Amino acid sequence: MKSNSILLLATTLTLGACGDNASTTAVSKATEAHISGVMLDEEAPITHARIEAHDRNGKRVAGTVMNGEERYAITLPPGTAYPVILTATPDGQSTALKAAITSDLVAEQDISSVTTIVVDTALSLGGLTEANLAKAARAAISQRRTSGGFGSSSGFKGDPTKQYGGWH
């Protein structure tokens, strides 16, 4: 699990540098955005949790509960102000996991300790802009390497050029 995260973060940074550096503060189109993924701890998927989505203004725009499912699914309403932060609180835990959704084009987003590091670091740098997310992803790679992680390409899917934290 750790090894996959390192390579995926590195790929995100490499490919993300090829894209534009526009701000990630957009408003969704007139349609709903359907997001799904898995929640991961260091050892296995999490199947029981409460997930909430908050828009760039901190307004709660959606929520769902996982009751034994292997994947979560959440629908963001039309007009949602991006970026959106998904906050997932596993049953029996007080610490939440986080992930950032920067566009209504994102359909897959896993939530893990690595995505939490990226969100928290970007927020501490001043917000969820592409520049801050890139810096945060580099910090997460560094933090994972110091804890013994190494790279692998197994299990990668998604388009990291469109979504920081979009590794799966």
Image (cartoon, rainbow, N blue to C red):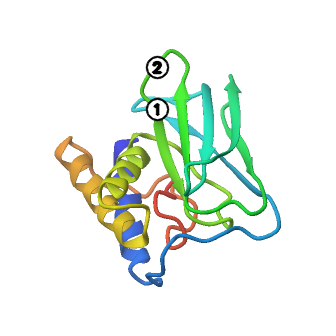
Marks 1,2: beta carbons within 8 A = yes
**Which quadrant of the figure has residue 29?**
bottom right
**What residue is disc 1 on?**
96
Q: Element under label 1?
A: loop
In x, y percent, where is residue 58?
Answer: 55, 49
Q: Position of residue 59 (x, y in %)?
A: 62, 48
Viewer-nearest residue: 166 or 118:
118
Residue 4 seen: no
Q: Secondary structure at mark 2?
A: loop
Q: Which mark is residue 163?
A: none
Q: Residues within 10 Å of mark 1 (few under 14, many from 20)?
A: some
Q: Is residue 116 visible?
A: yes
- Give left or right: position of 2 versus 19: left
Dividing the image into 4 quarters, which one contains the N terminus? top left
Q: Residue at x 40, y 61 (%)?
A: 127
Residue designated by label 2: 93
Of residues 39 and 154, the one drawn nearer to the viewer in this rendering: 39
Q: Residue at x 46, y 19 (%)?
A: 93
Residue 48 in picture, x, y percent from top left: 61, 23
Identity of the residue furthest to the right in this view:
31
